Amino acid sequence: MTTDNLFGLKVKREGNACRHCGYPVAVISAPTSEHCADLKCCACGAVWGALNERTASFIRSVANKFGAPTSPIILRRTAA
């Protein structure tokens, strides 16, 4: 699975929703900056933020092993 195959997968950020419309789900889309991919609100299209390579790599490895998820992926922040 390449980065392009990440595009279209849906994610939820734990405890966060779109600050523009309040919708809790975003879609992984083509990047507008140096990041691996952008996260855009499924409802209004607002950019939530970016997906870093570490997270994208993890999602790719899980999808390669188990197939693409059918429900949104829950993104959680971890302590550094």
Image: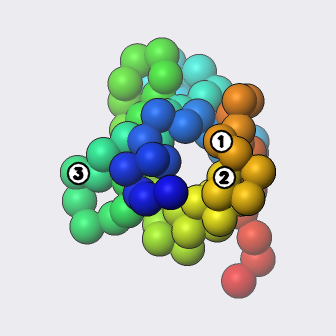
**Does residue 19 appear anywhere in the picture?**
no
Residue 71 drawn at (x, y percent): 73, 30
First in sequence: mark 1 vs mark 2: 2
Residue 47 drawn at (x, y percent): 37, 38
Q: In the image shown, does 47 or 70 lie closer to the viewer? A: 70
Are the residues tagged 3 and 1 within 8 Å (C-beta)? no
Quickly name the residue at label 2: 63
Looking at the image, is 69 positioned above or below residue 37?
A: above
Q: Secondary structure at mark 3?
A: loop
Q: Please give left or right for residue 33 compared with residue 72 in the image.
A: left
Q: Nearer the viewer, mark 3 or mark 1?
A: 1
First in sequence: mark 2 vs mark 3: 3
Residue 39 drawn at (x, y percent): 45, 43
Q: In the image shown, does 9 or 25 lie closer to the viewer? A: 9
Looking at the image, is 1 positioned above or below residue 43?
A: below
Image-quadrant location for residue 65: bottom right
Residue 19 drawn at (x, y percent): 50, 31
Q: Please give left or right for residue 22 compared with residue 78 in the image.
A: left
Q: Nearer the viewer, mark 2 or mark 3?
A: 2
Residue drawn at point x = 65 percent, y = 42 percent: 68
Quickly name the residue at label 1: 68
Are the residues tagged 2 and 3 within 8 Å (C-beta)? no
Q: Amino acid at mark 1?
A: Ala
Residue drawn at point x = 76 percent, y = 77 percent: 79
Q: In the image shown, does 32 or 70 lie closer to the viewer? A: 70
Are the residues tagged 1 and 2 within 8 Å (C-beta)? yes
Residue drawn at point x = 38 percent, y = 41 percent: 29
Q: Quote the CA–CA distance across marks 1 and 2.
A: 5 Å
Residue drawn at point x = 30 percent, y = 46 percent: 30
Q: Quote the CA–CA distance across marks 3 and 1.
A: 24 Å
